[in-house]
Image (cartoon, helix red, strand yellow):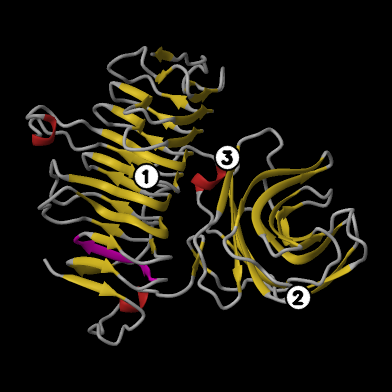
């Protein structure tokens, strides 16, 4: 096996048919940000009022961005950003940047409906922003049963950050379906005069349409490499060291290690190699904003040392993972696993890491991490748990929503260890008929921050509500 660092210089690679499929460039929310439409202009902000300039395009699932000029304003703050899924009645999600008088800046997400503007999440940004600075606001929205929104903002010319805030909206008030993209701004009532908000082109890109995005149960037909995709074989390991790299359309006979920011893998099959230590076939040990989508992971050499996808700071969308001791092992924060099929973990009778006993197989094992969302997946065929969410190595916070779960000894287990705290929400999941211990569909420790929605977790056949096994 050999390793190769992929970067923007393809000249060093021997030319052969299909090599052009290795696309490198700017990735936004797992998409090449190619403008499908654009709009520019200015809007007048009046104290206590919201102002919107709607573009001519929109989407159900996709991403959008625009560059704004922070206006001169007289008041405590100014708000600016993008609206997604905008409806004719004014309903929309807002990806918002708030700049205060002293330059403190906050990025967040809100949902606006007739009942008002509901702030969903917000975080203070490092440093300060000034009037007259050009700032970029970038946002994405996907999903139906669970709507996932993400936002980031940064000063034009600076390094683009990973997603600074994200939110999974499962409420009855969530906004679904097609809607327009718009530029948006607001001045609080305490402002003493109008302000003019100018912005450049509003650019947007819709996500590819696949059945799993509609809320249907993920299967082999709606996950993994799309049918008809032509793959180029790559022999050997890949170590990605160049920010913004995009690997597309590859059949990789080796491991992939992510060691750069804003990397994407799409429409690819990754098979791994001979494991000489504990690792994932695809591994990201914290590099920001890694996206892997519409791809397949399956070991050509199964091993007690080998998981499918391992790490943190990643978004996994429409994956098909077949095999691995754990399909996915989460060991840190900022993880999204959505619309994927995880099945058939590799079981071994003797595992040196289990004292010589059999392997402990989970489709998803989370050892620590906050801002972890597991939504809309089919998860089955593990020997121990479909989802084991632990606060074992540090604090934990996880959303487990709208999945199809089957097999194993127990399906969902939430567990605190070593004095760490775990916040967990389990809602809207459907459970199959197969498990070793029929009572153990959901197991959780009482106390702490665990919330399990009553009557929303049900049997897939018959719709009976699923109970909880509470442990101390």
Q: Nearer the viewer, residue 9 or 19?
A: 9
Cα distance, mark 1 to mark 3?
21 Å
**Pair 2/1: label in front:** 2
Query: What is the count of numbered marks?
Result: 3
Residue located beneath label 2 in the image: 40
Q: Give whichever of discs 1 and 3 has the lower sequence position.
A: 3
State the residue position of label 3.
Answer: 146
In primary-sequence order, the first of circles 2 and 1 is 2
Q: Dot 2: few (<14), some (14–19), or many (≥20) neighbours within 10 Å?
A: some
Farthest-out residue, bottom: 11
> In the rendered image, is residue 203 in sight?
no
Whole-percent x, y for residue 200 in the image: 71, 76
Q: Is residue 251 magenta?
A: yes
Report the residue marked by disc 1.
220
Q: Is residue 283 left or right of residue 318?
A: left
Could you say which is closer to the camera, residue 316 or residue 213?
Answer: 316
């Amino acid at each position: 096996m050999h390793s190769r660092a992929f970067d923007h210089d393809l000249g060093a690679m021997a030319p052969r048919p299909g090599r052009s499929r290795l696309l490198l460039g700017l990735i936004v929310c797992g998409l090449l940000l190619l403008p499908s439409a654009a709009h520019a202009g200015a809007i007048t902000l009046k104290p206590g009022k919201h102002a919107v300039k709607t573009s001519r395009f929109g989407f159900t699932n996709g991403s959008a961005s625009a560059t704004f000029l922070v206006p001169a304003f007289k008041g405590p703050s100014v708000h600016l950003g993008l609206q997604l899924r905008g409806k004719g009645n004014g309903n929309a999600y807002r990806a918002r940047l708030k700049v205060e008088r002293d330059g403190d800046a906050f990025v967040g997400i809100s949902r606006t409906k007739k009942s008002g503007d509901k702030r969903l999440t917000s975080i203070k940004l490092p440093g300060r922003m000034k009037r007259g600075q050009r700032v970029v606001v970038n946002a994405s929205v996907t999903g139906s049963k669970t709507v996932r929104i993400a936002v980031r903002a940064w000063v034009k010319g600076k390094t683009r950050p990973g997603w600074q805030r994200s939110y999974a909206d499962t409420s009855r008030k969530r906004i679904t379906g097609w809607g327009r993209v718009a530029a948006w701004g607001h001045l609080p009532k305490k402002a003493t005069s109008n302000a003019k908000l100018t912005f450049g082109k509003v650019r947007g890109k819709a996500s590819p349409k696949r059945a799993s995005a509609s809320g249907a149960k993920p299967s082999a037909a709606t996950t993994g490499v799309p049918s008809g995709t032509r793959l180029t074989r790559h022999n050997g390991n890949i170590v990605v060291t160049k920010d913004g790299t995009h690997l597309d359309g590859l059949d990789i006979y080796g491991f992939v290690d992510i060691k750069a920011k804003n990397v994407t893998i799409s429409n690819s099959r990754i098979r791994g190699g001979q494991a000489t230590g504990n690792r994932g076939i695809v591994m990201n040990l914290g590099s920001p904003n890694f996206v892997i989508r519409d791809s397949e992971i399956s070991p050509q050499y199964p091993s007690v040392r080998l998981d499918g996808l391992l790490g943190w700071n990643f978004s996994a969308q429409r994956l098909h993972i077949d095999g691995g001791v754990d399909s996915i092992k989460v060991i840190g924060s900022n993880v999204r696993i959505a619309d994927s099929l995880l099945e058939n973990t590799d079981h071994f009778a003797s595992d040196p890491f289990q004292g010589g006993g059999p392997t402990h197989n989970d489709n998803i094992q989370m050892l620590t991490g906050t801002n972890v969302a597991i939504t809309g997946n089919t998860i089955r065929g593990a020997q121990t748990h479909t989802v084991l969410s632990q606060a074992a190595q540090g604090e934990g916070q996880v959303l487990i929503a709208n999945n199809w779960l089957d097999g194993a000894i127990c399906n969902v287990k939430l567990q605190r260890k070593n004095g760490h705290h775990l916040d967990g929400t389990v809602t809207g999941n459907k459970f199959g008929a197969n498990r070793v211990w029929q009572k153990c569909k959901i197991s959780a420790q009482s106390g702490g921050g665990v919330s399990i929605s009553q009557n929303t977790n049900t049997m897939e056949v018959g719709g009976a509500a699923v109970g909880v096994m509470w442990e101390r």
